[in-house]
Image: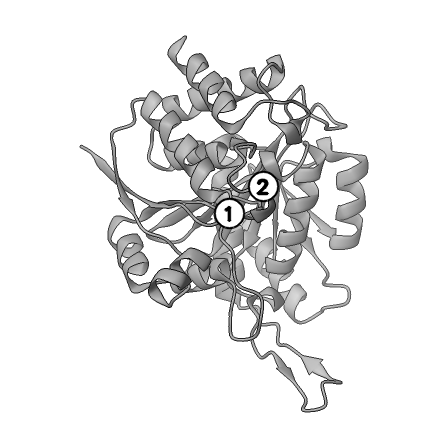
Amino acid sequence: MTQKIVVIPGDGIGPSIVEATLKVLEGLGCPFDYVSTNVGADALEKYGQLIPDEAIEAIETHKVALKGPVTTPIGEGFTSVNVGLRKKFDLYANVRPVVSFQGTRSRYENVDIIVIRENTEGIYSGKGQVMNDEGTRAETVSVITKEGAERVTRYAYELARQRGRRKVTVVHKANILKATSGLFLKTAHEVGANYPDIETEEMIIDNCCMQLVMNPERFDIVVTSNLFGDILSDLCAGLVGGLGLAPSANVGKELAIFEAVHGSAPDIAGKNIANPTAIMLAAAMMLDHLKMEDRAALLRRSLRTVIEEGAHKTVDLGGTASTDEFTAAVLDQIRAV
């Protein structure tokens, strides 16, 4: 049966790297029909809304979306498109894997970490943001719920079991943020007790940052709250060569949106030099989600071969290849199987 996928081209380099990814999915023989819509700056110009009603309806209907990076306009009155989508569809788990590739500028060869970030709560959600009339005092509210902490930590342990992972590291700041981070940590331990086959480790965020830089091989799956996860996942991307190699999935109870971690990079839009690896890896995550693991594995192998052989690397990876040349090389690897 044909699967319908919502395609959100996004802004800046988004349309070009999404187009490249659709070519690769076609090369893999994926039985997809695509429903195109958009969010972000392009949608604001066309529809007067950052997240148009038609985009919401398409995602609600078809449950799976592949999304290019988007731009949220600077200025008061504009809230983050990504945060808005996560809240709208209750996409509570942000899954961000990083894996080492030979032939990149990474200083490590053995990184294989999945950061799972709670996606809807905490200080990052932007609740209660106020500033006094003089502009001299600002405050915001951080809310952590037991339900929110429980479902994201349970997701982490279930993923560990599914992937044969050995350990879940719960990252927190409960020594200082005793109420909010304390509740997250306490709930994580309660959940972890139901998974005796998975080792549970807890680590304060400060130490975690240091250990990731010094000993990344000690980590397997990391689960943490919203703001900490946002920061740690970018740090982890730096361990493997940058955001151009970092995919992500936003997962809820009924639907999921797959995207690159990086932004829309308007300064290189239209130049045919953007690296599509991150969104292609996000497409591989989408294939796993749709139980097309063989195609996902072939896509990952093909990307790895192209990057490691080095002849068709994009500029950010130290090469000179265009987006089109990189994509053609990936397709050649797929067809060679």
Asked if 66 appears above or below 86 in the picture, the reply is: above
Residue that lies at the very extreme toward the left in this rendered image: 1
* Residue at 62%, 68% in the rendered image: 123
Q: Circles 2 and 1: CB distance less than 8 Å?
A: yes
**Which residue, given by chain and number where applicable, does mark 2 sit on?**
268
The crowding category of the residue bearing disc 2, from other C-alpha atoms within 10 Å (few below 14, some 14 to 19, many at least 20), is few
Q: Is residue 287 left or right of residue 153?
A: left
Image spot of residue 83 (x, y percent): 50, 61
Q: CA distance from mark 2 to mark 1?
A: 8 Å
* Residue at 58%, 41% in the rendered image: 268
Image spot of residue 192 (x, y percent): 56, 49
Residue that lies at the very extreme toward the front in this rendered image: 271
Residue 179's image quarter? bottom right
Asked if 282 appears above or below 75 in the picture, the reply is: above
Between disc 2 and disc 1, whose residue precedes? 1
* Residue at 40%, 62% in the rendered image: 45
The reply to whether residue 288 is in sight is no
**Which residue, given by chain and number where applicable, does mark 1 sit on?**
12
- Quadrant assignment for the N terminus: top left
Query: Quick one: 252 or 23, which is closer to the camera?
Result: 23
Query: Quick one: 33 or 294, which is closer to the camera?
Result: 33
Image spot of residue 205 (x, y percent): 74, 54
Q: Is residue 279 left or right of residue 221?
A: left
Q: Amino acid at mark 2?
A: Ile
Q: Amino acid at mark 1?
A: Gly
- Residue 85 marker: none
Residue 315's image quarter? top right
Image spot of residue 274 (x, y percent): 55, 35
Label 1: element kind: loop
Query: Quick one: 152 or 24, which is closer to the camera?
Result: 24
